Amino acid sequence: MTVLSPPPPAEAAPAPAPSPEPDPAPASRPPRGERAGLAFAGAALCVLAALLLGFAANLTIVGHLQHARDQQTAYDELRRQLALGIAPVGQRTYEGDLVTPGAPVALLRIPALGLKEVVAEGTASGVLMSGPGHRRDTPLPGQAGTSVIMGRQWGYGSPFNDIHQLPVGAEIRVTTGQGTAVYTVSGVRRQGDPLPPALRQGQGRLMLITAAGGPYTPSGTVLVDATLTSTAQPAPPRPLTLGWLDESEKALGSEKAAWLPVFLWSQALLLAALLTMAAYRVWGRWQTWIVAVPVLAALGLAVSGAATRLLPNLL
């Protein structure tokens, strides 16, 4: 008898592979024009942040550090010239050339304020970033006539922030290539106050000028008059006569020539910001910011430093 075995169970048909779901990225990705707009908006925010941080740093910490560095460099150079007997005693150098704006010409000391600053030639905004400046159309301190020295009130070391507190009779000492001149403060005045009496032949006066008003908001000038009590030194001929002065070197003047470096550094900053946005899409967030932040910060400092020269020179 033949026994029939049951047929083997039919193999189940393989389940159909699930169809791939559509990638949601294309649907959620903004159109090309909108992506370009977002990139420009991000670049604009980078530029704005770099400029604001650069201005804050230049007018505070970085500016003070720059002032301290420049003062040390100028002090070393002035000491060298005094030791060699080649420090300028007028508007011309030992070789007969006009003294370059920014070159050290004197050492100013005010014991009552604990102030010791190297004075540079010139009073444009860029010069006063390094310390006080000597107005080029006036005699050097220690010589007959009125010598004018300007300094910043708040920015870049704020060397003249407290000169309005000088009492009458306070001593001011200024060392030049002709020796040390001693002055005595005769008064502190502001714009509109009566002028001091005219000097007689052979007399000397020192005038210190800075901004008046609140922090970084100048509303005029403060002037300190000091009378020369030591012997007046002879003054060499001056090719730059009194009254000759560029507007940028007058009190509260701005340096219009700074517009070109501002424009060039701004272009570099904008390009760096656009490259940052492009790199963000390729590299990712952290890789991009690790590389871009130092570059943007340096360019922001450069732009704001150049733009600061457009602000009043006594700021």
Image: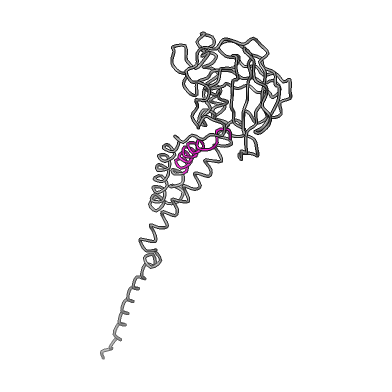
Residue occupying image coordinates x 32% and y 79%: 12
Q: Is residue 105 above or below residue 83?
A: below
Please tell me which residue is depicted at 44% across the width and 44% down the height of the picture: 292
The percent position of residue 86, horizontal first and vertical second, equals 50, 10
In magenta segment, residue 274: no
Q: Nearer the viewer, residue 185 or 180?
A: 185
What kind of secondary structure does the magenta stretch mostly adopt? helix
Percent position of residue 40, x then y = 41, 54
For the C terminus, the image quarter is top right
Tell whether 72 sits left or right of 38. Answer: right
Residue 183: image quadrant is: top right
Which one is in front, 108 or 227? 227
Q: Relative to 286, does residue 96 appear above or below in the rendering?
A: above
Rendered location of residue 143, percent (x, y): 59, 14
The image shows residue 18 at horizontal and vertical percentages of 35, 73
Please tell me in which quadrant of the rendered image residue 208 appears: top right
Does 19 sit left or right of 256 as displayed?
left
Q: Residue at x 50, y 27 (%)?
A: 245
Which residues, given as a range, are shown in magenta? 293-315
